[in-house]
Image: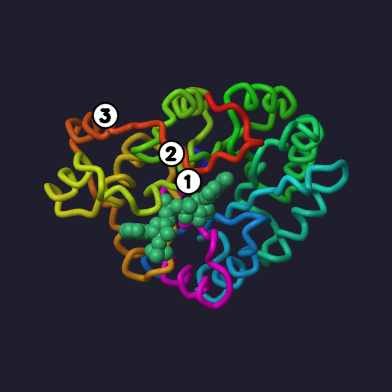
Amino acid sequence: MTNQYDIPAMGFGTYGRTGEAGIAAMLVALEVGYRHLDTAQDYGTETEVGETVKRSGLRRSEVFVTTKIKTGNFGKGMLVPSLRQSCDNLQVDQLDLTLIHWPSPNEEIPLEVYIEQLAEAHALGLTRLVGVSNFTIALIEQAKTVLGEVPISNNQFELNPLLQNRKLANYCLSSGISVTCYLPIARGVLGGEPVISQIADRHGATPEQVALAFEFAKGYIAIPTSGKAERIRSNFEATKLRLSSEDIVAIEGVDRGQREINPGWGPAWD
Ligand SMILES: NC(=O)c1ccc[n+]([C@@H]2O[C@H](COP(=O)([O-])OP(=O)(O)OC[C@H]3O[C@@H](n4cnc5c(N)ncnc54)[C@H](OP(=O)(O)O)[C@@H]3O)[C@@H](O)[C@H]2O)c1
């Protein structure tokens, strides 16, 4: 399952997957079939991702790797060297996808300053695709004018059945911007939602598999994580689960607009 940019719909989040335990979890992920690893300059897991791909024996081209530029690297002349460092950490010549992790807090650094540098990184071949994370519709529109011909191929933001972020997701898909859901399994709390657990029981699936299958049915990418082999495996099995149109409608009804990641300096959400 990949999209128009060849991004595998099932990815593995690497926040918290540090050290040997992190590498062990990522190796399980690659073994069970994940082919997309999501890291960030801020996670401290780029080195682990690079080491995992190397130890896995897979070819570089077989694993889609995303990193995100931290806001501390937005200043003039800083972004490109920081991405070269990310490439070194990851033991790659080129990222598959590089995202701006967050818009600059309180607009301290003007958007043009860091988006222009993202375009420069793309022109230098340091990344095949560019995108954003935690961007609103208005910020994406501004970024588009700076990027010109270079497409924004992805926006990564919080999305799961409890927070469906429909306005932003619909805008992205209709503009050719793929959507990556972070917190796609709402950190494991979905079993407490009766509609989801009933659908899960009917399919002999877990609530997390139902959430992921819902996101795939919508055409989104999802990047769940776990430190536990059994969960890494069972989450991946969601790629085989097909929900009915009645299931989808029922899940649409559980949206509570409940955002977990909401820093005070974040943009006003759509
Ligand atoms: N762009 C951004 O600003 C941003 C922000 C947040 C996250 N992210 C990305 O999104 C990824 C995922 O986000 P996340 O880790 O916060 O949320 P998540 O994937 O929704 O949830 C992960 C949590 O759920 C538990 N879990 C995993 N599988 C489970 C299962 N089958 N049943 C019950 N519990 C389960 C895990 O615990 P165990 O380890 O104990 O299994 C872990 O605590 C991150 O790793 C990161 O790559 C991006």
Q: Where is residue 34 in the image (x, y as percent from the top left)?
A: 42, 60
Ranked by sequence position, the earlier of labels 2 and 1 is 2
Report, in whole angstroms, how far the alpha carbon at label 3 lies from the one at label 1.
20 Å
In the image, taking residue 81 as reference, residue 241 lies left or right, namely left
Helix, strand or loop for disc 3: loop
Q: In which quarter of the image is residue 188?
A: bottom left
Amino acid at circle 3:
Gly
- State which mark lies toward you, 3 or 1: 3
Residue span colored magenta? 8-30
Could you tell me which residue is drawn at 59 percent across and 52 percent down?
Answer: 66
Could you tell me which residue is drawn at 77 percent across and 48 percent down?
Answer: 72
Q: 262 above or below 269?
A: below
In the rendering, which numbered label is found on residue 159?
2
Helix, strand or loop for disc 1: strand
Q: In which quarter of the image is residue 150?
A: top right
Helix, strand or loop for disc 2: loop
Q: Where is residue 56 in the image (x, y as percent from the top left)?
A: 50, 74
Q: In which quarter of the image is residue 16?
A: bottom right
Amino acid at circle 2:
Leu
Does the magenta segment cover residue 15?
Answer: yes
Amino acid at circle 1:
Tyr
Q: Mark 1 points at which residue?
A: 182
Q: Is mark 1 within 8 Å of ligand 1?
A: yes
